[in-house]
Amino acid sequence: KAGVTQTPRYLIKTRGQQVTLSCSPISGHRSVSWYQQTPGQGLQFLFEYFSETQRNKGNFPGRFSGRQFSNSRSEMNVSTLELGDSALYLCASSSGPTDTQYFGPGTRLTVL
Amino acid sequence: AQSVTQLDSQVPVFEEAPVELRCNYSSSVSVYLFWYVQYPNQGLQLLLKYLSGSTLVKGINGFEAEFNKSQTSFHLRKPSVHISDTAEYFCAVMTLNGANNLFFGTGTRLTVIP
């Protein structure tokens, strides 16, 4: 089985712009979770989608949003980018709630 | 609320020596426990997990971990490390209250010295 794929792998944006990141889960997995990794804050949970519904959300501002499509692929969007949004964004998929999460390689976002 | 504490931010160890990476957690509900490894410029790879049953869990690459409920610990061990084990290691918990998200520790940087 192919693993979790994330596109693009690297992005450079400027403050005020918006960005969309994409995640394709492992075939058959219906749950997709997003995490932000920064040197200062470590790994933090953003949100989780299951069967196209957001089931859980972390403590991030409304500029961070996401969605999931019927084929389980997920996108996350960050609007009005700030310098502090520079991070590695990781996507993880699992077959269902409380099942093991498998991570993709991440998208490295740099905000200038 | 839950939290995960990785007591050592950096652990240097000589090649072929044993290593233990420490993890303690706090949670008001039952949890699943995980160890992930992250190599430079890569995502997280699952090393092992504890869901239930035997408290000694064996994972990939020769790693194992022991769940100790009374001490709320889940320490990771390897009897003999290799250069290729140099990486960042993360301990994580998932609560069994329906929320499908992982809470991570701050990570331990393992450096294997030739």
Image (tube, coloured by chain):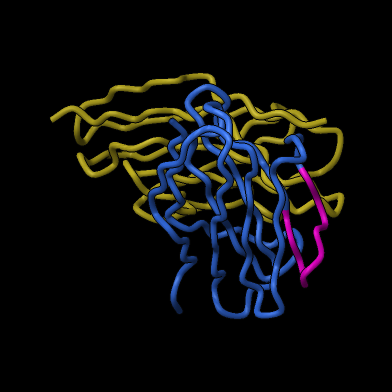
Chain colours: A blue, B yellow
Residue at the spot 56% in from the left edge and 69% down from the top edge: A25
Give the magenta-colored segment's residue range. A48-57
Closer to the camera in the image, A28 or A22: A22
Q: Residue furthest left?
A: B114
Q: Quadrant of the C terminus of chain A?
A: top left
What is the quadrant of residue A91 in the picture? bottom right
Q: Quadrant of the N terminus of chain A?
A: bottom left
Closer to the camera in the image, A69 or B89: A69
Residue at the spot 52% in from the left edge and 22% down from the top edge: A40
What is the quadrant of residue B80 in the picture? top left
Residue B92, placed above or below residue A19: above
Q: Is residue A95 magenta?
A: no
Residue at the spot 38% in from the left edge and 49% down from the top edge: A10
Closer to the camera in the image, B104 or A85: A85
Left or right: B28 with respect to B12? right
Where's residue A78, x and y in %? 63, 45
Q: Is residue A49 magenta?
A: yes
Residue B87, placed above or below residue B106: below
Where's residue A51, x and y in %? 77, 72
Residue at the spot 81% in from the left edge and 51% down from the top edge: A56
Closer to the camera in the image, A91 or A80: A80
The secondary structure that dominates the magenta segment is strand
Where's residue B7, x and y in %? 53, 19
